[in-house]
Image (cartoon, rainbow, N blue to C red):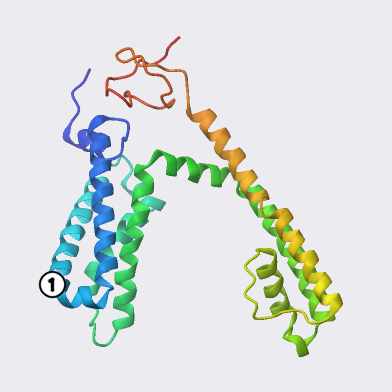
């Protein structure tokens, strides 16, 4: 077996999550992400900022340097750097570090709203955790696989909302708060989703009957997207699991693309057959 060079070793630690070193790196990075997000949240509290603002500022720059180093190592070790840079996670990684550098350039006195936005953008570092959690990746794949079914479902809901909204505009009219069809559609969506703000309410008997039908429709369809997503999650879990076992600890249930045992870290055989 050929010895790995430095770039390949870095790639295995940073990108491959099924190796012991990769798992340790992911766990360390998740803790750093959580701490950085907590620091941003505490920094938004005026009393905390007044007392510990300078310490939080230094801590933020420590996190920024660590994330910048991670970002550069990912570009360096990736076989296709441009593909990584323009990927979803590559953009998230960039967003997680760029606000700190931009805040040095933009004067806070003149653009305080922009600076506040840049500081809030650091919260998106929590998206970096998704790459390091197998369950999160499974959920994302399930959502992607069910996208067409969910799109059809929301299209049907939109059509129903337009019908109910138009009917409520006709029945209730502007004198009862239904001043336009778009506003009536807004009321319908709020009603179907069982939110019920109460800012607009039907006053006529026919309007109340229509509202009752809209509520019953909402209760009838609210479980449909949950069922679609649950079915896709079940399919992904079946595809992801295999009967491969570890010769060292005899544990089963490893992913098809796993190279190392999740329990003891020993390299898995290519096939059980």
User: What residue is drawn where x is 22% and y is 68%?
Assistant: 101
Choose between 234 and 82: the one closer to the eye: 234
Provide residue 32's location: percent of width, then percent of height: 23, 52
**Looking at the figure, which quarter contains the N terminus?**
top left
Residue 180 drawn above or below residue 65: below
Provide residue 93's location: percent of width, then percent of height: 31, 55
**Looking at the figure, which quarter contains the C terminus?**
top left
User: What residue is drawn where x is 64% and y is 48%?
Assistant: 148
Q: Quadrant of residue 40?
A: bottom left
Most extreme residue toward the bottom is: 175
Provide residue 158's location: percent of width, then percent of height: 71, 64
Most extreme residue toward the right is: 206
User: What residue is drawn where x is 49% and y is 46%?
Assistant: 140
Q: Secondary structure at mark 1?
A: helix
Choose between 88 and 180: the one closer to the eye: 180
Can residue 75 be spotted in the picture?
Answer: no
Choose between 271 and 194: the one closer to the eye: 194
Q: Residues within 10 Å of mark 1 (few under 14, many from 20)?
A: few
Q: Quadrant of residue 52?
A: bottom left
Residue 170 drawn above or below residue 19: below
Provide residue 136's location: percent of width, then percent of height: 43, 44
Q: Which residue is mark 1?
A: 54
């Amino acid at each position: 077996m050929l010895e790995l060079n430095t770039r390949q070793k870095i790639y295995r630690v940073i990108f491959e999550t099924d190796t012991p070193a990769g798992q340790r790196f992911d766990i360390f990075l998740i803790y750093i992400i959580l701490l950085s997000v907590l620091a941003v949240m505490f920094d938004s509290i005026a009393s905390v900022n007044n007392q510990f603002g300078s310490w939080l500022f230094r801590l933020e720059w420590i996190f920024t340097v660590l994330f910048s180093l991670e970002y550069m190592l990912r570009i360096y070790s990736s076989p296709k750097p441009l593909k990584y840079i323009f990927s979803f996670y590559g953009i998230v990684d960039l967003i997680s570090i760029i606000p700190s550098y931009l805040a040095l350039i933009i004067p806070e006195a003149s653009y305080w709203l922009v600076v506040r936005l840049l500081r809030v953008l650091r919260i998106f570092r929590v998206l970096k955790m998704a790459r390091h959690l197998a369950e999160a990746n499974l959920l994302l794949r399930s959502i992607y696989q069910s996208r067409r079914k969910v799109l059809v479902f929301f299209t049907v809901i939109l059509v129903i909302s337009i019908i109910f909204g138009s009917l409520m505009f006709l029945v209730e009219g502007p004198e009862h708060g239904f001043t336009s069809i778009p506003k009536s559609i807004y009321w319908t969506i709020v009603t179907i989703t069982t939110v019920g703000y109460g800012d607009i309410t039907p006053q006529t008997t026919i309007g109340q009957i229509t509202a009752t039908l809209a509520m019953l429709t909402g209760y009838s369809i609210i479980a449909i997207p949950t069922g679609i997503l649950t079915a896709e999650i079940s399919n992904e879990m079946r595809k992801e699991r295999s009967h491969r076992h570890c010769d060292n600890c005899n544990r089963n249930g490893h992913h098809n693309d796993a190279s190392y045992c999740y329990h003891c870290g020993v390299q898995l055989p290519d096939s059980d057959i």
